[in-house]
Amino acid sequence: MMGLGMSELLIVLAIVVLFFGGKKLPQLGSSLGESIKNFKKGMNEKDDDKDKKA
């Protein structure tokens, strides 16, 4: 099983906080969320284009 346990997630979170600092975390989360949203939107548009051609 290759899932991450609670201890691994806490270690990753601690490293992220040390690397980016507490003030930049909300901005980082917002940017990440917007990137995921744009990626999903692009994938949906690609699927729509594919359906129109078929």
Image: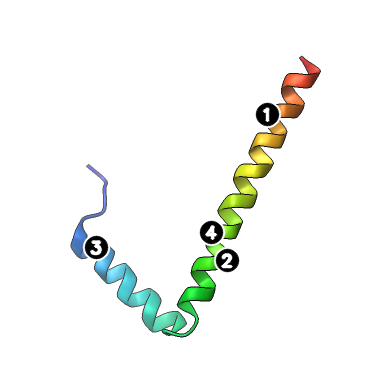
Question: Disc 3 to disc 1, how far (Cα)?
Answer: 36 Å
Q: Earlier in the sequence, mark 3 or mark 1?
A: 3
- Residue lying at 22% horizontally and 42% vertically, measured from the top left: 1
Q: In the rendering, at what x and y percent does residue 25 appear?
A: 46, 76
Does residue 46 lie above or below 13 as drawn? above
Comparing labels 3 and 1, the label whose residue is closer to the camera? 1
Question: Among all residues in the image, which is located at the extreme top?
Answer: 54
State which quadrant residue 31 falls in.
bottom right
Residue 48 point in image, percent of width and height = 72, 28
Residue 20 at what x, y percent from top left?
46, 81
* Residue 11 placement: quadrant: bottom left
Question: Number of numbered discs present?
Answer: 4
Mark identifier at residue 3 = none
Q: CA distance from mark 4 to mark 3?
A: 22 Å
**Label 1 element class:** helix
| Of labels 4 and 3, the one closer to you | 4
Question: Which residue lies most toward the right here?
Answer: 53
The type of residue carrying mark 1 is: Asp
- Image position of 1 (left or right of 25): left
Q: Label for residue 33?
A: 4
Are discs 4 and 2 less than 8 Å apart at CB? Answer: yes
Q: Residue at x 32, y 68 (%)?
A: 12
In whole angstroms, how far apart are the C-alphas of marks 1 and 4? Answer: 21 Å
Which residue, given by chain and number where applicable, does mark 1 sit on? 47
Q: Residues within 10 Å of mark 2 (few under 14, many from 20)?
A: few
Location of residue 6 with respect to 53 vertically, above or below: below
Are the residues tagged 4 and 3 within 8 Å (C-beta)? no
Q: Which mark is residue 8?
A: 3
Q: Kindly identify which residue carries mark 2.
A: 31
In this rendering, position of residue 21 left or right of residue 45: left
- Secondary structure under tag 3 reads helix
Q: Counting other residues with Cα less than 10 Å from the Cα at mark 1, is it few (<14), some (14-19), or many (20 or more)?
A: few
